[in-house]
Image (tube, rainbow, N blue to C red):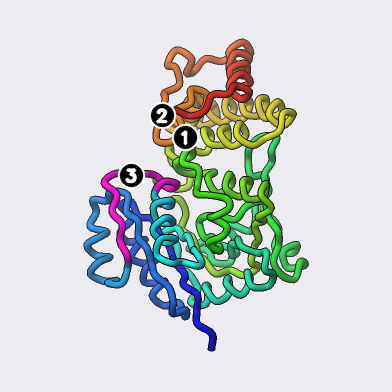
Amino acid sequence: MSEEKKVSIIILNWNGKNDTLECLESLSRIDYRNYEVILVDNGSTDGSLEDARARFKNTVIIENKENKGFCAANNIGIRYALGHGAEYLFILNNDTVVEPGIIHDLMDALSQREQLSVVSPLIAYYDDRKKMQFSGCMIDWGNGDLCRQYEWEYIASQKGLLEIDFASWCAIFLKREAIDRVGLLDEDFFAYYEDVEWGVRGAQLGIKSFLYPKVLVYHKGSRATGGVYSASVYFYLFRNRFILIKKHAPFLRKIQFSVTYVFDSVKKSRQLAAAGKQDLADALMDGVWSALCGAWKQQRRAFPRASKGRTGVLKNIRLWGLVVKTLFSNSSGK
């Protein structure tokens, strides 16, 4: 039997004690031998690390003094893994559990062709394991959104790996040379859309992403940011879709995006406010304003109070003008 290649599994934790321990327990049952688990902690105060050390003694733990976000913390883990001989990397959200055969399955998938280096499995919901959470998204460059996922019937018809726009960093398996060529995650994003941007960057270099058509991961969803529809999620989604388009969309797509971005932002914020969710509406518009002000990474700028709640065509035209100006400026995040 040939020697197994070293796999480094990288997990982030930020006050996610129960989820992280369940994830580590799941990883302890995988049927691959030559692997290490790297737990990168973003300044937790809930006793996560003490319990992880006590229960999973072989886990490598890297402690950050503060919450560095998804991108920077993963980059710290990746640098450690590459510096300690990892040949494959498996980045995994802490609010997941995995099938025992996941490493063998994904490694076999990448071995089908020499040029393959990036793959994600189908990801199902933790609480409803017949429902897909990730099945390969397509990027809509006209509005910076992820327009739809592939239907199961189409995935099954491909009879193997399916090329997709980007692999989900909720659970991504890749060869180290993919990181060597594409680079680390872009820390301008902090969290959300960073996997989309990395996939786009990779595709520009000829490194394609693929979907493995088998459910191997079960995901609870956005636990570290307060849930699927928390204020933090609204902030980062609306801020970071702008950053993605500014960095990578062609000229005409930026023009199209400028219109849909203003329309979507204003419409959604009004809907949230009308539903009594003013905190979510404010977070969304703060995300828009932060994008326009260059408040990227961990920064945040509040939408001008005098503008909140205003309606009318003139206000939207002014916002659109600022979106266009910022999209085509040479400035970047501060």
Q: Can the viewer see residue 276?
A: no
Give the Cα separation between the discs numbered 2 and 3: 15 Å
Residue 300's quadrant in the figure?
top left
Q: Can the viewer see residue 17?
A: yes
What mark, if any, has residue 67 been given in the picture?
3
11 horizontally vs 285: left or right: left
Give, as a three-letter code, the residue at label 2: Arg
Residue 191 x/y as whole percent: 46, 43
Above or below: residue 172 compared with residue 279: below
Circle 3 crowding by C-alpha within 10 Å: few under 14, some 14–19, many from 20: some
Quadrant where the C terminus lies?
top left
Residue 165 on the magenta segment: no
Give the Cα separation between the discs numbered 1 and 2: 9 Å
Residue 67 on the magenta segment: yes
Magenta part of the protein: which range? 60-72
Q: Which residue is mark 2?
A: 300
Rendered residue at 55%/62% (across/down):
174
Of callouts 1 and 3, the N-terminal one? 3
Rendered residue at 66%/60% (across/down):
210
Residue 39 x/y as whole percent: 35, 60
